[in-house]
Amino acid sequence: MTLDELLAVVERMKALGAEEKDYAVLRALVESYDYLTDAVRENRMTLDRLRQVLFGSKSEKKERVLGRTGTGAEGRMAGEGEAKAETPAPAKPPAKGHGRLGAEAYGGAERIVIPHESLRNADPCPHCKGRVYTQKEPAILIRIQACPPLQATRCEQERLRCNLCGEIFTAKPPPGVGEGKFDASVASMIAALRYGSGLPFHRIAKLQESFGVPFPASTQWDLVHEAADKIEPAYRALVDLAAQGELLHNDDTSMKILDF
């Protein structure tokens, strides 16, 4: 029912002979109901907050249950407890290590196991006569750093030339660098940014240039196009699998059709 319909019911109650104070109570209830429903509907009040407003805090402490009805020591304790309850407690800062996301959420983070610098399992305790043992759960430190989507490594290989025969000897690159200019993961990252997150090639190029690792849009397209040929069989298999489905869902952004 709308607010006007509810108020009309209250007015009919008044016309039937309801007392003025009863009429005032009914009208206040209707207006409060309208305010609370609008607050919840417009996300100005959470359901937990609404529950506290309507029913109060559900604390079962003795001073809240008994109030000031006790005598002697109990009465003083109840009075002191009620006085403390009226004074809002200062907000406690969140405990360290209790953030929005736990350590398990960072599955893609590089994992580094750090042994203790001086102690090993079953070593004597440096503070007493006991022994220290390795705990099942280690202390977790999450460290987040910023970096461009595509990083480059510049290897400066020393070259030496013989002054007699002219032979040039070049130092070998460090292990793990690989051959060629582009790693296999580059095309995957570009495809994920472009087709997974909707980031255009030219915008990726500007971002990379600002980090000092230029990556032209044309080069991005060439790498993605070449990599697409390698996953073509998997894509065709998914298309054939989708064609066997009996229920298809289509979701598109709503837009106004100007002309057919």
Image (spheres, grey):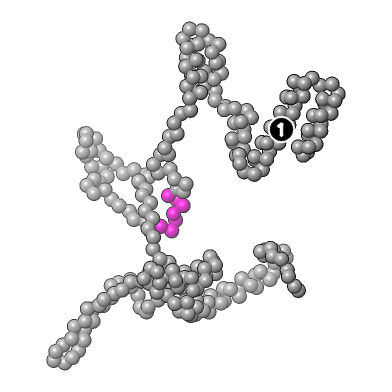
State the residue lying farthest toward the front. Answer: 20
Identified at 84% across, 28% down, the residue is 12
State the residue lying farthest toward the right. Answer: 16
Tell me the quarter of the image containing the C terminus: bottom right
- Exactly how many numbered labels are in the figure? 1
Magenta residue check for 104 = yes
* Residue 75 sits above or below residue 254 on the image: above
Apparent side of residue 164 relative to residue 150 in the rendered image (left or right): left
Identified at 75% across, 20% down, the residue is 21
Quadrant in the rendering for residue 34: top right
Magenta residue check for 102 = no
State the residue lying farthest toward the top. Answer: 72
Residue 250 visible in image: no
User: Which residue is disc 1 drawn over?
Assistant: 31
Tell me the quarter of the image containing the N terminus: top right
Residue 253 visible in image: yes
* Residue 211 sits above or below residue 32 on the image: below
Apparent side of residue 113 relative to residue 233 in the rendered image (left or right): left
- Give 168 or 37, whichever is nearer the viewer: 37
* Residue 176 sits above or below residue 40 on the image: below
- Give 257 or 114, whichever is nearer the viewer: 257
Q: What's the magenta region?
A: 103-109
What amino acid is found at the position of numbered circle 1 in the picture? Answer: Glu
Identified at 81% across, 29% down, the residue is 11
Apparent side of residue 70 relative to residue 254 in the rendered image (left or right): left
Quadrant in the rendering for residue 130: top left
- Give 245 or 6, whichever is nearer the viewer: 6
Apparent side of residue 89 relative to residue 9 in the rendered image (left or right): left
